[in-house]
Amino acid sequence: MNPESCCQKTRTAANVLAILGTFLVMAFLVALMRHYTATPSLAEDRGAERMKILKEFNEANAPLLEKYDWQDKDKEIVRVPVARAKELVLEEWQNPAAAHSNLVERAAKAFAPAPKPPEKKSVYE
């Protein structure tokens, strides 16, 4: 075996290993940079924020949906829990003609303008 040929093979093997090592180091650095520069998923953040807002909204409005209360005492409009309101509507609409006339009557009452307060007379009159 020729010593020059042996050195040439060793040199070629060393060059191949150096090139391969360089590619491996670059691949590692690219993976490392991707890990450090990755942004959090916007969908997860927005989803969590929306769920928090929905929970707060439901907690704040639960008393309005689950209890009886006056909506407008002057017009005698009462707030009814949702489940009971559904039952009442199903009962009332067994007779559609009567339910429709009742609905029109209640709407006229609910949307009627508020009565004007009496005018104050001037002390000088």
Image (cartoon, rainbow, N blue to C red):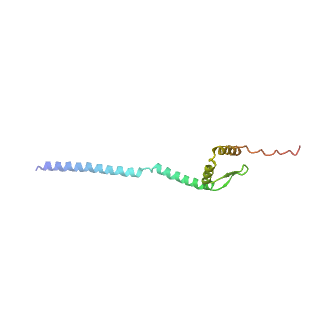
Instruction: Identify the residue at horizontal 64%, vertical 49% (top origin).
Output: 92
- Outermost residue to the right: 125
- Residue 46 relative to residue 15: left or right: right
Q: Position of residue 114 (x, y in %)?
A: 74, 45
- Residue 121 relative to residue 35: left or right: right
**Quadrant location, the C terminus:** top right
Q: Name the foreground residue: 53 vs 74.
A: 74
- Outermost residue to the front: 95
Instruction: Identify the residue at horizontal 54%, vertical 54% (top origin).
Output: 52
Q: How many marks?
A: 0
Q: Name the foreground residue: 16 vs 11.
A: 16
Q: Quadrant of residue 102?
A: top right
Instruction: Identify the residue at horizontal 29%, vertical 48% (top origin).
Output: 23
Q: Position of residue 53 (x, y in %)?
A: 55, 52
Q: Position of residue 58 (x, y in %)?
A: 58, 54
Q: Position of residue 85 (x, y in %)?
A: 62, 52
